[in-house]
Amino acid sequence: MASSPWVYVQDPVQHLLDQATTSMKNYCNVYAVSAESLKHLEPAVHRETKHAIFAQEIQDSLALSKVNAGQASTKLLSAFVTLEHSICNPCPMNLALIMSVICNLGRQSAWHIQSSLLEHLKKMAETMQQSHPWILLFDALVRSPNLVTDMILCCLRVAGDVLSSQLGRFTWKTLYVQERLCDCLYYMGVDGERIEARRALLEAQTKFYGPCARNVLWTLTNVADDFLQQARTLESEEAYHSALVRADTHENYHRAKTRFAALEGLADVWIARAGLRGWPSEGWGTVWHGTRIDWSALQNVSDYLEAAEQEALTWFESSGQRTLRVQSKKQSLLVLNLHSMG
């Protein structure tokens, strides 16, 4: 009997990964040389773009879900409506931000929202022209619920490489996609690659925009956070202070955004110095037992949190994720102080 010829059967997971990354590669290659790409100038204020508003509404919805389910649901519905307006004019930049939102939902264990968002994106992609790469891209992501964030990382690495090759490393489009990749690496806890990528991004952004540009200052606070995670508290403090000083080159909201991040970060530096690394996310009960606390350092924590809260209440929504987060830290600090007295 003649032996049967070998038949190669591709791993279905690898097939979907190839489908996603190939779709992203083709999309970015076509976009980079298109007339549409030439029309896409950098927004004067990124936070006012539809995709940035969508991302902020998702963030606020997640924060509100812990204190007011009704408001959280309203904010989530608004985010989905904003998303539909965002992709009327699709590009790799708004796709990268959408992907970072999907990764953040995974980090927050908001699996139902993540799944609903992916299904919604797939349906919207199917309304585009028949050969549009988003169709196969979101088809692959929807069919890989347990690997969606890993696939997104692969796709954003591909997108960054293509745009860097086609448009150059020092262009706003390449830098924007690389910044979103750093966000996703953070959300997924890929520490080594993220730390290296953020420092490279800070260097490239500083060269392209100058040392006081808003996105440079934001990346600087992220690099400061990385230093703190590595227990390099002095370098972290210096980076946060540098961001705080440079924030004064801006006005109003843009000054407040950097100041808030730097002040909250400085509070975290003093939390570490107080011997409370991991607090308050792990709860005071976790850090209390077996921990020698430097109570004098907690006054600095309180002062920085108070200053951060004032920035938040002045410039951001009282129900927004920044305000709620810093207020939660203040409450945890109060509980810790009360516990020490009693």
Image (cartoon, rainbow, N blue to C red):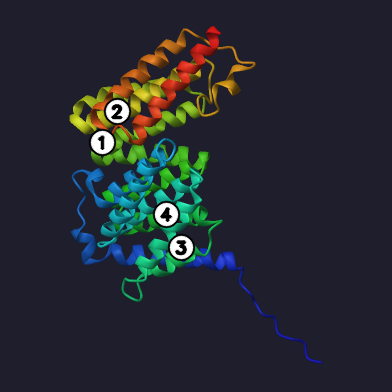
Disc 4 to disc 1: CB gap under 8 Å: no
| Residue at (27, 25) in percent of width and height | 311
Residue type indicated by callout 3: Thr
Q: Circle 1 — which element?
A: helix
**SS category of the residue bearing label 2:** helix
- Residue 224 horizontal/vertical position (percent): 40, 28
User: Where residue 21 is drawn, which disc sits there?
Assistant: 3
Q: Identify the residue position indicated by label 4 in the image.
A: 156
The quadrant holding residue 213 is: top left
* Circle nearer the N terminus (4, 2): 4
Marked residue nearer the N-terminal end (3 or 4): 3
Task: Describe the element under mark 4 as helix, strand or loop.
Answer: helix
Q: Which residue occupies the foreground of this view, 327 or 206?
A: 327
Q: Which of marks 2 and 3 is in front?
A: 2
Residue 340 location in percent, x, y? 54, 10
Residue type, label 1: Arg
Per the image, the residue denoted by label 2 is 312
* x then y, percent, for residue 225: 43, 30
Circle 3 — which element?
Answer: helix
Residues under labels 3 and 1: Cα distance?
31 Å
Question: Cβ–Cβ below 8 Å for labels 1 and 2?
Answer: no
Name the residue type under label 2.
Ala
- Mark toward the start of the polypeptide (2 vs 3): 3
Q: Position of residue 119 (x, y in %)?
A: 43, 62
Can you name the residue that lies furthest to the front here?
70
Q: Rounded to the nearest whole Å, what is the CA distance between mark 4 and mark 2?
A: 31 Å
Query: Which residue is at a point 48% across and 53% down the rendered structure image?
Result: 112
